[in-house]
Amino acid sequence: MRLILNQPHFVYTYSMISLPVIQSPIAPGFIDLGLGDPAFFLLPLDLLRASTAECFARGDNSFLQYGAEQGSGPFREALADFLTRGYGLPVGPESLFATHGASGALDLTCTLFTRPGDTVFVEEPSYFLALRIFRDHDLRIVPIPTDADGLVVDAVEEKLSAAQPKFIYTIPTFQNPSGKTLITERRARLVALAREHNFLIVADEVYHFLDYTRKPPAPFAAYTAEGNVLAINSFSKILAPGLRLGWIESDAETVRRFVTCGMLDSGGGLNPFASAVVRETLEKGGVEKNIQNLRTVYRSRAQRMESALKKYLPDAQFQSPAGGFFFWVRLPGMDTSALQKKAEAFQVGFRPGVRFSSAGGLKDFMRLSFVHYEADEIEEGIARLRDCVEAE
């Protein structure tokens, strides 16, 4: 007998009742496997409560001021120590710039390094909300194919004969949506091309620390010292998205470009309050402990999703992710946008592949996330998806 779950998930509320508020509303009983938000119980309330109390107990209220443009020095020092341990290579605080999350970093990069009509290269598929940011800036988006080893760098070189991008946007590790990881040899070659043709590599590395079955290659942050590489990361995936805190790592000239921009000249550093809280968390090893917990939980959920896909959708094609948040699933010959609409009647959701295409393709793909729901709910969601597919 199949398990039917009717546990309500939280929805938007504007009343005075103290209920959790989430970005994407979910109807009670609906399982949205497209949702890439962590479950509420995975948000480390006690950890961040203790860190906040430590901040106030110090008696230093400097984090309530506008803050240094590059970000608090003590925060960047704590972050540099954390990254040095995590990457296994030295990171200096001078190479770091505090941002209001990865999305804010990406938008500010577009503001400072592009003008309307400029060309940017992106992976096909790519993170659909990054594509929206590029369109907000009226950029010309050129897709570059990917394969099992990530971005096809041969295709980058071919495109460079016809177009000069301001930057190439890549999610090199446990990519959103495909889960693929760019191999070391291609990373090094892409860096060489960037320096030869004078374009910027904007590497979105927010999933780098969330490995479950194998360690990823060295991050693009390892290539920043000599220029042409800008590595973006965030605490949204490894601590809590509500912090709205991330960082950019790059060479001195690029960091200076961010630090001296007009927005910071007017408003000061980005999110000094959250930086102070996270500094406390970093210095006490809390971020690393939280990452270990997330790895344990997400590894189990990914395994459950993989087994459910094999059980209920044996004709589906996918590559099991070694980390990150997502499965990228192909249902050959099926229009997943149309399937998504029909799936509503089966109380299950996902993200259709066309949303991740800058060229209107990938119509028989879907993105499924394993981070928001418990393992039993994940299996139930895949079973419902099977029922929807069989009703076609």
Image (cartoon, rainbow, N blue to C red):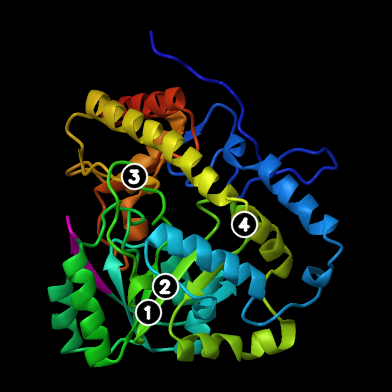
Q: Nearer the viewer, mark 1 or mark 4?
A: 4
Reading the image, the residue beneath label 2 is 231
Q: Residue 212, how many percent across, how many down?
A: 34, 42
Mark 4 and mark 3: span between their CA atoms?
A: 49 Å
Q: Say which element carries label 1.
A: loop
Q: Say which element carries label 4.
A: helix
Q: Which residue is drawn at 25% across and 79% down?
A: 191
6 drawn magenta: no
For the residue marked with disc 3, what is the amino acid?
A: Ala
Reading the image, the residue beneath label 3 is 338
Q: Say which element carries label 3.
A: helix
Q: Say which element carries label 2.
A: strand
Q: Which of marks 3 and 1 is in front?
A: 1
Looking at the picture, tell me which residue is in the foreground, 184 or 285: 285
Quarter placement of the C terminus: top left
Whether pointer 1 and pointer 2 mark residues with C-beta atoms closer than 8 Å, the reply is yes
Circle on res. 334: none
Query: In terms of secondary structure, what is the magenta stretch mainly?
Result: strand
Q: Which of marks 1 and 4 is nearer the N terminus?
A: 1
Q: Which region shows up in magenta?
A: 143-149
For the residue marked with disc 1, what is the amino acid?
A: Thr
Mark 3 and mark 1: span between their CA atoms?
A: 43 Å
Q: Residue 282, how many percent across, how many down?
A: 60, 56
Mark 1 and mark 4: span between their CA atoms?
A: 25 Å
Reading the image, the residue beneath label 4 is 283
For the residue marked with disc 2, what is the amino acid?
A: Ala
Q: Residue at x 47, y 42 (%)?
A: 292
Mark 1 and mark 2: span between their CA atoms?
A: 8 Å
